Amino acid sequence: MPCVADWLNNPFSIVQDIFAQNVPNSDWERKVTEYFKEKLKENNATNWVPSLNDVPVHYLKPNSLVKFRCMVQDMFDPEFYMGVYETVDPNTNARVLHFGKYRDVAECGPQQEIDLNSSQTVTSERQTFYCVPVPGESAWVKEISFFASQARVSPSTSYTPSRHKRSYEEDEDMDLHPSKQKEQHIGNVCLNSYYGSGGDIHGCVEPKRLETEASAGHHLISPNCSPPLDLNFPLPGEKGPACLVKVYESWETFKVNDVLEVYGILSVDPVLSIVNNDERESSALYSMECMDTAEEQRVHSPPASLVPRIHVILAQKLQHINPLLPACLNEEESKTFVTNFMSELSPVRAELLGFLTHALLGDSLAAEYLILHLISTVYARRDVLPLGKFAVNLSGCPRNSIFTEHIYRIIQLLVPASYRLQMTIESMNHSRFIPHKDYTANRLVSGLLQLASNTSLVIDETQLEQGQLDTTGVHNVTALGKLITWQKVDYDFNYHQMEFPCNINVLITSEGRSLLPSDCQVHLQPQIIPPNMEEYMNSLLTAVLPSVLNKFRIYLSLLRLLDYSISEEVTKAVEEDFVEMRKNDPESVTADDLHRTLLVARFLSLSAGQTTLSRERWLRAKQLEVLRKARLQQQKCVNGNEL
C-alpha cells in the first residue's frame, strides 16, 4: 500500500530523493513521472488524491498532491525558469544543488544565496494553461465525483490551513510591522522571475499577502485589486476554481477546449499574489520590456489564493467526464465493465424510451429521436464536413410555457455537461457568444460558445418575440448557425478569425420551424395535456429511481464512445434500396434524405448495442423517417405553411 504521508502529502520529499540520487544525470525527471504514475495505479489510488473540483483550495495543504478536472480555456506564452539552481553559503562557501521543477518559489535558508552565475544552473521551459471547471458540468457529475473521492480522502479534510487563514489581529500586526512579513519570505525567489517569457532578468516583489478567499462566482473582488478579477468562465453563474496549470512535458499534445485531468503539486505561495499596481510600479521590478502591460501582469499573475497554481506531474486528456464510466475503455477491467453493461442494454433502452416518452407528453416518436440525438457525436471530418452531427429541432413546443424548461432539466439529469440558451432579442444583442483575443491583457476572453466536446446545448426559441437584432445579435445568430452546420466556432482575433472545431450536441426547441438550421425536425404531437405541467414533470422525476437514472447516464455516455461500421454487403443493399426509393418518388427523395437516414440507422444501431448496420435496423430507420416526414406534411397542410 502506498505511503500516503510521503507521496500524497509531501510529494517534494519524493522528488528531492530522486533528484539527489540521480544528479547530475537529467534522467531524474523521467523517474519522478514514472514513480507517481505507478503509485496512482495502485488500489484506486487516484481516489485518494484531493480534487480542486471538490475541496476549497484553503482546505488543501500547500505543496501537496492534488488533481483537477478542467477545460483548457487559454494558453499563455511559454515561460523560462530555473530547472536546477545552486545555492551558496557566503560564510562557509558550501554549495548545494536544488531542483526548480514543480516550484514557483525557490526557498533558501537565511544563510544561503542563489548563485545566478553558477555553471550548474539549468534553464528550462514550461507551458502555462489557464484552466476552468468543465463549463456546464452537471450537478450529478460533481456529486458522484465528490462522494467517490471523499470516502477515501482524509488529508483534504483533516488539514488545518494555518498558513493561508490568519486572524484579523495577525493581519493588523503584519501591517504595523512589515518586517515580520518580510521575515516570512526570507530567501524566497520567484523561479521564473529571472527568466520571464521574454528572457529578461528581473526580481520578484514581496507583496502584502492577499486575504480574499476564492468564493464561488464569475468575478472576485480583492482589497488590493481593482476592478474585480474576472475568472473568465465561458458560462454565466459558473462556480469553482480557475487554475494556472504549469505543464512540463508534451504540452503540444493539448489544445484550447481540451478536457483534462491533471495530477500535480499545489502552489499557493503568497509571494505569487502580485496584484497591487501601485506596489508593482513603485518597486520598479517590472519594466515595460518584460511585463508589457500592468493588465497583462494582473491576468497572468493573479492572486494565488484566488487562482492557485498546479505544477503538473501527470496529465491525461479525458474521453468523457462521466464518473460512472471507467476513464479509459481500452483497459481490461474497462472491457469487462462494457461487456457486462451491454448484456443488459435492451431493458435499459426500453426504460429510457418510456421515461422520455412520458417527458415528451406521450410522444414516443419524438422520444426515439431524442435518444438518437443524445448519443450522436462527430466521429470524423471529411474535408470541412463534420460526420455524425445530429442537431434536432423539436418543434410544436408550447409557447411561453415551462415545458421546455423541464425538458432541459431532464437532459441535465442525463448528460454530463449541458447549457440552456434562452433565445430572446435581448440575449442575442447583449450576450458574448464568440471568444475574442484581448491583446492588452494578452488573453483569450471567453464566450458562451467556448464549450467542451460532447456538451449538450439546448436552444430555446419559444420565448423569442419580434424585435430588431443589432450587429452583435446578427453575429451571434450567425455563430450559432455555423456551430450547428459546420461544428466550428470562429474565434475573434481582431485582425482575423480563427476556426476552432467543436463537437456540440444542439437541440432546438421551438413553436414553429426553427430560425436556425438543423439536421432533423421532429414535430411534437402530445398525447396527453397535463392540467398542471409542473406537477406532472416533478412526479415523473420523483418516480425514477437513482439507480435507474445512473443506468441511463451510463447508456448515453457509453454508446457515444463505441465504434461503428457498415459492411460492404449492407452498403450495396442500401445503395440499391436508395435507387428504388428515387425511382418511386424522384421529387421527394434526395441525397440529403439518404445521408439523414444513414445517420438515423447508425444511431439506431448503436442505441441497440449493435456496432454494425443490419438490414433490420436500416428498415426501421426508413420507417422512422417516413413517420417523421408524414407528421411534418400533416402539420404543413393544417397550417397552410411549412413549419
Image (cartoon, helix red, strand yellow):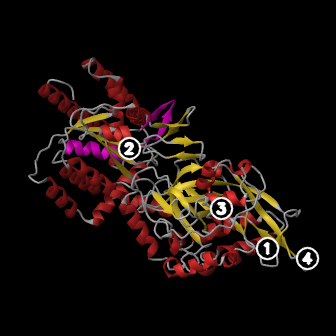
Q: Is residue 373 magenta?
A: yes
Of callouts 4 and 2, the N-terminal one: 4
Q: Cα distance, mark 3 to mark 1?
A: 38 Å
Q: Is residue 150 above or below residue 291?
A: below
- Give the residue number, with chain letter if any, for mark 4: 93
Q: Quadrant of residue 36?
A: bottom right
In this view, the mark in front (3 or 4): 3
Q: What amino acid type is highlighted by mark number 1?
A: Ala
Magenta segment = 364-387
| Numbered label attached to residue 279 | 3
Q: What amino acid type is highlighted by mark number 2?
A: Asn
**Count of picture labels:** 4
| Labelled pair 2, 1 in contact (Cβ < 8 Å) | no
- Quadrant location, the N terminus: bottom right
Q: Cα distance, mark 2 to mark 1?
A: 51 Å
Given residues 397 and 613, the one toward you in this image is 397
Q: Is residue 638 above or below residue 484?
A: above
| Numbered label attached to residue 505 | 2
* Crowd around label 4: few <14 · some 14–19 · many ≥20 (10 Å): few
- Give the residue number, with chain letter if any, for mark 1: 20
Q: Quadrant of residue 169?
A: bottom right
| Labelled pair 3, 1 in contact (Cβ < 8 Å) | no
Q: Cα distance, mark 4 to mark 2?
A: 65 Å
**Percent x, y for residue 446?**
49, 46
Q: What amino acid type is highlighted by mark number 4?
A: Asn
- 271 horizontally vs 123: left or right: left
Q: What amino acid type is highlighted by mark number 3?
A: Glu
In this view, the mark in front (3 or 2): 3
